Image (spheres, helix red, strand yellow):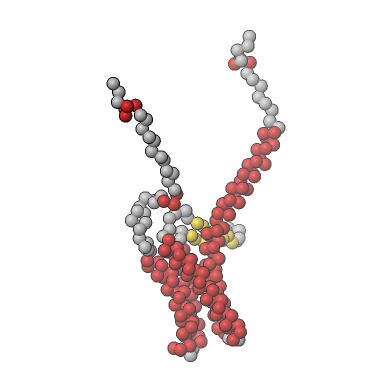
Amino acid sequence: MNHPAMNSATPAVPQVPLLDDDTIAFGEEDNANKQFVHPYIVFFHLVFRCSAIIVYILCGWFSDSFIASFVLVILLLSADFWTVKNISGRLLVGLRWWNYVDDNGKSHWVFEARQSRVNRNESRLFWMGLTLCPLVWSTFFIFCLFGLKFKWMLLVLIALTLTGANLYGYIKCKFGAKESLKSATTEFMKQQIFQNAPAFMFSQPTPPNAGNTGVV
């Protein structure tokens, strides 16, 4: 005699879909719970651009030489531009932008976005430093413009150019990569439709083989 419990169907365990955002890649298990994965990169991402602003504000208190202050700020801005463009953007948020010249002498700009997990704290500090510093330099530009300090305005314009270039490049990487992929896919589908539609419309149907029909 069968026990009633043996005849009852075992309830199915509900299958919960695994979200892509919860998937941890192989080798990243130890980094998932860390507050900062690249602490030194975060430090150098912020130290050069913040130092340039501090030196610009306080240079008049320590030196009366405009040339020395100008050169020091330019060196800090150059170090910041190189670090943000080549190191911190790639490691902290998985973005990279660069330029190359082909054999015909034509310049090409490339904006890349890597599909991988990024540390939330590092990403927040990266974008905060990337966006706030150009705003600070824009404020300095307004002060120089209304104060008629044209020699300092030149330095501020250089700072805006360097920091703004990185800001534009990484915004293009983050938001322009998806649009580029979508437009490339759309163009590919259009090309395939226009190429295959005439052949499909004007193709002649293949007559059936009499030997395989079974008709005597």
Number of numbered callouts drawn: 0
Query: Which residue is rendered at x = 48% and y = 90% of the image?
Result: 64
Query: Which residue is rendered at x = 56% and y = 73% of the image?
Result: 161
The quadrant in which the N terminus is found is top left
Where residue 115 appears, as percent x and y from the top left, is 47, 53
Which residue is more in the foreground, 112 or 42?
Answer: 42
Does residue 24 sit above or below 47 in this rendering? above
Does residue 190 sit above or below 201 in this rendering? below
Residue at the front extreme, as displayed? 4
Q: Is residue 157 visible?
A: yes
Which image quadrant is residue 164 in?
A: bottom right
Which image quadrant is residue 215 in?
A: top right
Which residue is more in the foreground, 20 or 74?
Answer: 20
Where residue 117 appears, as percent x and y from the top left, is 43, 55
Position of 187 with respect to 52 (left or right) is right
Query: Which residue is rendered at x = 63% and y = 48% of the image?
Result: 187
Residue at the right extreme, as displayed? 202
Residue at the bottom extreme, as displayed? 64
Where residue 114 appears, as percent x and y from the top left, is 47, 55
